[in-house]
Amino acid sequence: MQTELMPSPVPDDPPPIGKQLKQLRQAKSLMLEDAAAATKIARANLQAIEAMEYGKLPADPFLRGQIMLYGNFLGMDGRLAADRFIIERDGNNTPASSALLSSLRHHSLAPKKLAEPTHISSATLAVILLTLIVVSFSGFCLYFSWNPFAFLTGKALPHSATTTNAFHPADPASGNGNGHTTKALQVDAFFRQNDTIIVTVDNKPTVAQQQSKGATARWEAEQQILLEFSQPDSAELQLNGMPVPFPENVNGRYTLRLPSSASTP
């Protein structure tokens, strides 16, 4: 007696990907709103994917990305799900679809490397900041006509001194630079250090003046000027606009007598 072999049952075709995605979502007790919030995919697109409403779906590059993301979120192979969805949409007519699906089963979807923001190196940032500081400092110096090198070395031109002391005993207005006329003798001094000066102008009373470093002074006379300095080389001197040497030491005093033939009153 021969035994008849029963034909093995033919396995049912798996449901479409859209339906599988819907079943997985419902199995997780998730609403479309929950899936949309978690995947950042529009609810309308998720609903169209599950219902396989192909006319409502975006272009293939965007569609593949959304299905891959949705499938991975629900625990499927998102890349395989995306390819099968496209094949189902095209009516299973894509050439070599079976080979493609077979090869994709052995590969997991690798996350795309996001573009990193451009970073500015510390050296470049330091150069930019240094350039801004130099430009700002130069503009400050130009605007205020300030010479930083003269400030650092303690030297400046006589006309740039911060204090000016014009003295003429015969003319009280000469203290503020108003109302005096040009005399036969005019001595200008720019002080490089602090000093005490004994001043005699024409036949006027002798006076003592305290001068500080960086100050300027001017004495005018019609006949004679006598200046006695207590410190060597304490000032740069000019007579009627022409440089004159600082007087030499005589008994601890440095006396400038103008004119040189004049006698002490």
Image (cartoon, rainbow, N blue to C red):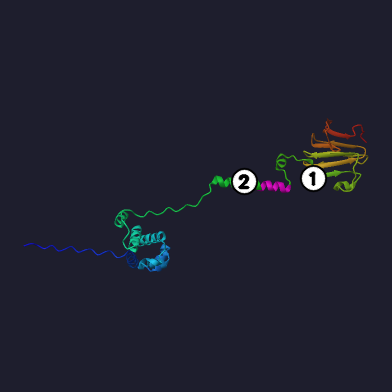
Q: Residue at x 34, y 59 (%)?
A: 83
Query: The N terminus lies in which quarter of the figure?
Result: bottom left
Please tell me whether residue 237 is drawn above or below residue 116 in the rendered image.
above
Q: Main secondary structure of the magenta part?
A: helix
Left or right: 119, with 11 as reference point = right
Disc 2, SS: helix
The residue stretch that appears in magenta: 136-144
Look at the numbered discs 2 and 1 and tell me whether their residues touch, using CB distance below 8 Å: no
Res. 163 mark: 1
Quarter assignment of residue 226: top right
Local crowd size for mark 1, using a 10 Å CA cut-off: few (<14), some (14–19), many (≥20) = some
Asked whether 97 falls inside the magenta stretch, the response is no
Left or right: 5, with 240 as reference point = left
Task: Read off the residue under disc 2.
Answer: 131
- Estimate the x, y position of residue 153 in percent, counting from the top left: 71, 39
Query: The C terminus lies in which quarter of the figure?
Result: top right
Please tell me whether residue 95 is drawn above or below residue 163 in the rendered image.
below
| Marks 2 and 1, how far apart at CA | 35 Å
Please tell me whether residue 126 is drawn above or below residue 6 in the rendered image.
above
Local crowd size for mark 2, using a 10 Å CA cut-off: few (<14), some (14–19), many (≥20) = few
Tell me the amino acid under the disc marked 1: Thr
In primary-sequence order, the first of circles 2 and 1 is 2
Asked whether 143 falls inside the magenta stretch, the response is yes
Quarter assignment of residue 77: bottom left
Q: From where the camera sits, is residue 60 visible?
A: yes
- Estimate the x, y position of residue 140 in percent, counting from the top left: 69, 48
Which sits in the foreground, 154 or 195? 154
Which sits in the foreground, 72 or 130? 72
Tell me the amino acid under the disc marked 2: Thr
Disc 1, SS: strand
Q: From where the camera sits, is residue 207 visible?
A: no
- Estimate the x, y position of residue 14 in percent, counting from the top left: 28, 64
